[in-house]
Amino acid sequence: MLKFFFAFEGIDGAGKSLQLKHCAKALQEMGVSVVTTCQPSHLAIGKLIRDALVNKLDFEETTLALLFAADRLEHLKEIESQLTDSLVLTDRYLLSSLAYNASALDKAWIESINRYATLKPKKTFLFDLDPKIALERIQKNRTTPEHYENLSHLEVIRQHYLDYAKVDESIILIDATKPITTLTDEIIEHIKPYL
């Protein structure tokens, strides 16, 4: 029997990566087999994207969007194989491309190049946070900002996320200002019906 797939989304600095780790640990303590993954992936295309995000490589936005779509397609094979035995939690998925890439490119084009990402998360947890607070968090953890980590970009990206949340019932809006343990408990309650 196939297990379920959940995505953790939000602007940089919202705390989704940390929360994914806490949720995975909580689920494992409940006896649930859990696999965590992320996008960009650890695969070859994902590594190129990671280098571009930290400014080691310089790609046009269009190229970067195509790389994200290609990485997702390759990564899907791995996710689908993991779903036979485990619940899968991913740090970013399709919604990231729709929010981030559409901050600089045509939304319809972004959707079209990602049309083969047919595996849909059961739920997407969207960590919402004021971009100013997100940047403060980022600056505490890193000295060099990544590609999209500036206020004007993050404001546009946050709005894209919120727009998608208004029309997609599978997206659960999470107040990322809440304490870590409160958020973990809240998310686990959303996942429990699928266990």
Image (cartoon, helix red, strand yellow):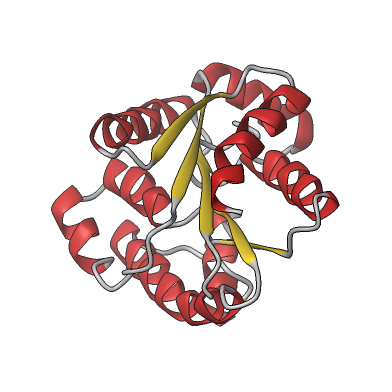
Q: Is residue 122 left or right of residue 62?
A: right
Quadrant showing the C terminus: bottom right
Outermost right residue: 29
Height in image: 99 above or below 194? above
Q: Residue at x 38, y 45 (%)?
A: 100
Residue 23: give x, y in percent of width and height.
Answer: 72, 44
Residue 128: give x, y in percent of width and height.
Answer: 50, 26
Q: Residue at x 31, y 49 (%)?
A: 98
Height in image: 65 above or below 148? below
Out of 186 and 130, give the one closest to the viewer: 186
| Whether residue 106 is visible | no
Residue 155: quarter of image: top left
Outermost left residue: 108
Residue 16: quarter of image: top right
Residue 14: quarter of image: top right
Out of 26 and 180, give the one closest to the viewer: 26
Residue 31: give x, y in percent of width and height.
Answer: 80, 57
Out of 93 and 34, give the one closest to the viewer: 34
Residue 94: give x, y in percent of width and height.
Answer: 39, 56
